[in-house]
Image (tube, coloured by chain):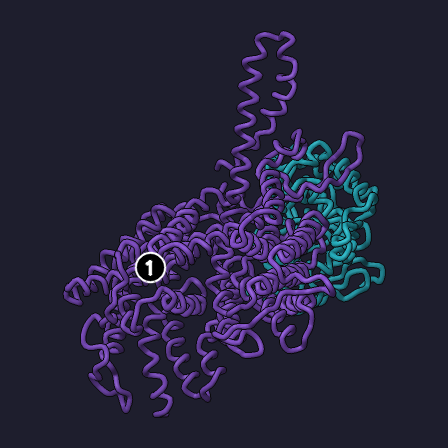
Chain colours: A cyan, B purple
Amino acid sequence: MSDDALLVASGITKRFGGILALDHVGIEVAPGEAVGIVGPNGAGKTTLFNCLFGLEVPDEGSVVFAGRRIDRQPVWKRSRLGIGRTFQRMELFEGMTVADHLLVAEQAASGTVRIWRDFLHRGGPTPAELHHVREVLDLLGLADLAGRPVDTLDLGHARLVELGRSMMGAPRLLMLDEPSSGLDADDTARLARILDQTRRSTGVAVVLVEHDLALVESTVDRLVVLNFGKVLATGGVGEVLADPEVRRAYLGITA
Amino acid sequence: MTQFLDYAVPGVPFGCVFALMAVGLVLTYKASGVFNLAFGAQAFVSALAYVSLIQDDWPRWAAGVIAVVVIGPFVGVILDRLLFRRIRTASPLVKLVPSLGLLIALPQVALIIAGSEPDIPPPAIVGDAQRVYLHLGSVPISGLELSISACTVLVVGVLVVLFRFTPVGLEMRAVVESPRMTELAGVNAGRVSAFAWILSSMMAALAGVLLAPLYSQLDPQNFTVLLVWGIAGAVIGRFSSLPLALVGGLALGVAQQVVVGYMPAGVIANGLRPSLPFVVLLVFLPIARQRQLDDPLSACDPPSSAVERGTSGYRSASTLAADDGTVRSVGLWHQRLGGDAGDRHPGLLTRRPTATLAWAVGGLAVLSAVTWVPPDWLLTMNQGVAFAVVFLSLTLLTGMTGQISLCQATFAGLGGFVAGQLANHVGLPVVVGMLAGGLLAAGLGVLVALPTLRLAGLPLALATLAFALLADNILFPNSWIGNGAGGVTVPRPSAGPVSFAAAKPFFLLSLVVLAGASVVVKLVGDGTMGRYLAAVRGSELAASSVGVDVYRLRVLVFALSAALAGVGGALYGSLEGSLSPDGFSYQISAVLLVVVAIVGLRSIAGALVAGLVYATLQVAVTTLPSRFAGLVAVLFGLATLSYTRHPEGFLDFLGARTLEFVGRRRAARSATHSPTPGPGGTGGTGTAVTGAHAVPAGEGAG
């Protein structure tokens, strides 16, 4: 285990009844690094995400984020420590506007108690918070849609809102669960561009679960291949994808 | 062992009826997504029909058959067609309110149709209710117990055959397992659902007819109490398993007799029986919720219907991108649904017509109240103001957070009792007592919120219902809280030389309290917390994923809401001079929720109007001759039915309609003016554009 790693998960094991969803999976992410997780459906990618993020409690294993054990922390605490996440099946605040999605995330990330200030009518967003919301809106190209309720957005924009929400409050790690699912080529390209820009400007680390190999190749530094709950291979993108075992398990190519 | 049997065997017939109810509830819940609280009312209707027919000299078996096979299903089919079928995919609140309203209104409607309340004690359907036919060991079995058990065995047998060996049974089993999956497989779920309603209604009817002889007189309340047992049985069945619900109901029936049998007599033993459902609900609800998530297609939920959006629309669209490139925050608590956040309507009256109107009327009312209004009107208005404070607690909890509480009256009662007890025994000033009552209610709110933290929607509503029942039976009868039937006196406050004993000063004091409560609700709604609450309502998972501590927020809101209810209850108590626990039973909680939901949960004005409506209703029920009092219930039922069409509430619906009307008028005016762009048309066209634009996207008219 390297000392400077941002996220170190080791020996993660998760069973659902008789099914072994994760079998001693380890993953390590350095600060600023982008790691892709690929694998066939049912390989345990989302389960791994849920274990890292706190939605599932792993049966065994530990998760260390920025030098702290976080495997017993609730989701909201992990979020405040600096982990942002999007969901494969989108989770938006139905009825709320685009700008409010970002503002809620920005304010919640600071963890300040607001209720007493609300009573004094002093609980509103600070100029700095509003400024950051504006910045992210600009980055995502959503400034024109800031006042629109999210229910009225198309899928491409909605995915961007979810991405933007995960980016609020200066996270150190973004966990993106199939951000391109349901998007067309143009939307996916835009997503890749925005991810690239964000990484360069903020130095945030990214863990990306994705089936779109073009997006994976253009974004990540390193690839982890999961199959049947086990790490099949890990390493540079080209090298891993050339691995005959990976090609057989994931790409279905018999080399 | 024999002692155990002595206690357990008499519980079996109860268990049978609980089991029938539990199975009926699960059946309709899974087949149509509605947890039918009107089940108790349906049981009453059939029991009433049964007894009325017997009074008209029908043979008992014929009356029973008519009540169970004809009248029961008839009511069920009507409810399904008119109401429940339309709200299959609606939010928990939209599903719950109509069934609550029917639970209250349906018995009254039935009584009106029946003409008069039957005055004979209800007989058993077969045999003699009182006669002992046989002994099981040393336990005597009466005709009533025998008939109940025999009928239940018969029904269960028929059910098993139906479910195992008929095509429609197979389809129903599939629907119960997963409605969505079944529909995808090409089964007409609507037809299956109708069949499930018929079956379920027959069970309600049978339960009613079988249990009627237990009581010397038919009273809708008895059937509501039974319903809670049925609910507990359904929860043991995890809302989804018919056999488990059956076993659960049976076990509960036996358990309640055994528990009471072994307990020493007294308040605890008397209270223990009714509070057993609460314990069961608390233990089993978290498991049940987990099971609900197991539907393999739950990820493919159909998109929420327009009905649902009508209530879930949040009201703090409070950030806007301004032209100068900054983002500014504007407190838009009353942001209209579907309208573009960029729209600013000119003029207060066109922007929020009903709210403005309500405030204007309210202002006039205050003015007249302190000048010329007769004393009894003033009393009614004051009652309305006190209840408005209680309703505000629901605006906060249900309107903003989407959490459904069926124990707000309990909190209100607690606040009132505490204020009275402190004033009577400690000599604390009543105003301080009101605050203490609010605080204590908040504490109790935390106690209720903590074990139910992980619950939301229907399970939470049921847990609060069970808690209200527990309070009715264990807390309120105590002399140091509600003092049972005797009640508690609450004096009018006085502060030094200023006395609020007279009607007018007290009215003004009430207004001040209401204003304070309104400010609290508005500040929370407009502030950051309101935005968090809207986020949690939108997606709990996403809210916690961005760092919102959802559970803490929930407890906080629940406590705050309980505090408001407590203060409102104390105010009401001080106004009336005395309070009795009857006025704060769980039924009252249900009525409160239904009233404010119909009027409007999404604004402070809604709470105020609801308060006045409720006070007026009370006056109407108590002063009108009894046959008209039934009509009030009918109106109440009709309003409940209309609620599913306008879940945003009457007030917002009216507001949307007014905006539409104004918009149309302006458009029409501009149309007549525009062909002649003379000097006369200058004023009209400019506003006409904004006027037409001001029409919201028709959400209200849904």
Q: Picture coordinates of residue B472 (x, y %)?
A: 50, 71
How crowded pointer 1 is (Cα within 10 Å; few <14, some 14-19, many 20+) is rated as many
* Closest to the observer, B266 or B245: B266
Q: Amino acid at mark 1?
A: Gln
Residue A174 makes an appearance in the image: yes
Kindly identify the residue that appears in the image at 65 percent across and 74 percent down.
B422
Kindly identify the residue that appears in the image at 79 percent across and 42 percent down.
A130
Kindly identify the residue that appears in the image at 46 percent across and 55 percent down.
B619
Q: Picture coordinates of residue B625 (x, y %)?
A: 36, 55
* Closest to the observer, B478 or B382: B382
Give the total number of marks visible in the rendering. Answer: 1
When the figure is inspected, residue B250 is found, relative to residue B179, above or below; the finding is below
Q: Picture coordinates of residue A66 (x, y %)?
A: 81, 60
Chain letter, disc 1 residue = B
Q: Picture coordinates of residue B248 (x, y %)?
A: 40, 72
Residue A34 makes an appearance in the image: no
* Closest to the observer, B598 or B227: B598
When the figure is inspected, residue A223 is found, relative to residue A64, above or below; the finding is above
Relative horizontal placement of residue B594, taking residue B136 as reference (left or right)? right
Tag 1 residue: B42
Kindly identify the residue that appears in the image at 65 percent across and 30 percent down.
B345
Q: Quadrant of the N terminus of chain A?
A: bottom right
Secondary structure under the numbered disc 1 in the rendered image: helix
Q: Quadrant of residue A212?
A: top right
- Pick out the residue farthest to the right: A4
Relative horizontal placement of residue B336, taking residue B127 as reference (left or right)? right
* Closest to the observer, B675 or B85: B675
Q: Quadrant of residue B30?
A: bottom left
